[in-house]
Amino acid sequence: MARMRYHYNPETCQYEPIIHTGRHFLNQTGRFILICLILAFGGLAYYLTHYPSLDENQLTRENHELKWQWGELQNEIRHVSNQLRVLEHDDDDHYRVLLAMNPLDPSMRLAGAGGHAPVLLPADESVSEILGAYDSLFRLGNRIEVHEQSLKELEKEVAVKERQLSTRPAMQPIDNRQLTRFNSIFGMRLHPVYRDWRNHNGLDLTAPQGTPVYATGDGIVSFAAYNGGYGNVVYINHGFGFESRYGHLSKFNTQPGQQVKRGDLIGFVGSTGVSTTPHLHYEVLYHGKYVNPINFMYRDVKQEEYNKLIRKAPTVIPDNKSSGVEKQ
């Protein structure tokens, strides 16, 4: 049984039992609900102000991730730019120097090809940083494009140089094992037949009759026939201004118009034309001018022999002898 509650009535000076009516119950219930609502809204407001929502937490994490990625992107831009600067230095100061090519103008490397379209964004510190990175990336792309074009030019030039090296006379036309001696050197000499001083436009390589004679570089045979003092002679046009000639041959192993490679057999040592003994008269011309063939045979001649041949080349013509140009 529920306990009866009383209250003091001053009019009757008596304690009277408390009787709860419906209105009283509603008033009490309304106050309780109001207090609960006030506490609930207050707690919710406190939570919202002091504890971020799930969306805010996710946005915060994404923001930190983007900041980290932004820093890594800037580091990568600086790293790629530094690496590209090294490649550009090697391009201008090494490869182009070796290939006798002019270095690229620095303004061409820095400016690249044109500029990027303007990007309109609100004026803000972070926006300015983004625009700066965008401009750096654009210029970096232009520098890479210029460097790619430079590499293509280098590749073409290397191909030309390789072909030039393969065609240039760069070996001895007679095997050292069959070479008896260098009989006459380049320059002024006393002619063994005419007995006067005249210019000798090549080298005389003495070897036994029938010794194989080889092409000293790639090229096309432009002449292969008997020609006066040369006797049986072969001319090879190597391109790039070079020509080699092989005189006094006993017989040919090639014909005009034939394309030959360095080391191909083109004939045999003989003594045709103006000659006193079997030997090969070997000449090298550059743009129509005679040059010393010994300078193109350094791989076959020992350094001591090379220096000896250079020192023996006469520079003074005796006064009591006539000079001329040898026709062989």
Image: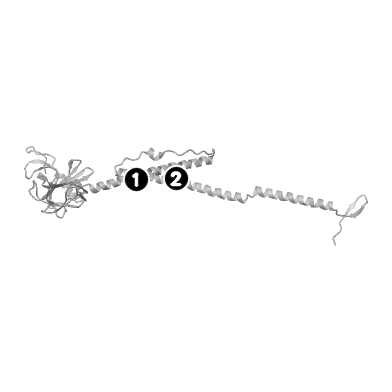
Q: Tell me what residue is drawn at x 66 percent, y 48 percent.
A: 48
Does residue 88 appear anywhere in the picture? Answer: no
Drawn side of residue 276 relative to residue 264, left or right: left
Secondary structure of the residue carrying numbered label 1: helix
Q: Secondary structure at mark 2?
A: helix
What is the tally of numbered marks visible in this picture? 2
175 relative to 148, above or below: below
Q: Position of residue 101 (x, y in %)?
A: 30, 41
Which is nearer the N-term, disc 1 or disc 2?
A: 2
* Mark number, residue 107: none
Q: Which residue is mark 2?
A: 78
Disc 2 crowd, CA 10 A, few/some/many (<14, 14-19, 20+): some
| Residue located at (67% from left, 50% from top) | 47
Label 1 belongs to which residue? 152
Residue 172 located left or right of residue 149: left
Q: Could you tell me how far apart the alpha carbons at marks 1 and 2 are, in whole angstroms? A: 25 Å
Residue displayed at 44% across by 45% down: 78
Q: Residue furthest bottom?
A: 1
Residue 68, given in percent of the width and then of the height, sits at 51, 48
Q: Callout 2, which amino acid?
A: Arg
Left or right: residue 183 versus residue 133 is left
Image quadrant holding the N terminus, namely bottom right
Say if residue 305 shows up in the picture: yes
Query: Quick one: which residue is furthest to the right in this view?
Result: 12
* Foreground pick, 303 / 249: 249
Say few, some or many: other residues with alpha carbon within 10 Å of mark 1 (under 14 / 14 to 19 / 20 or more). Answer: few
Does the residue at mark 1 contact the one at mark 2 (Cβ under 8 Å)? no
293 displayed left or right of 191: right
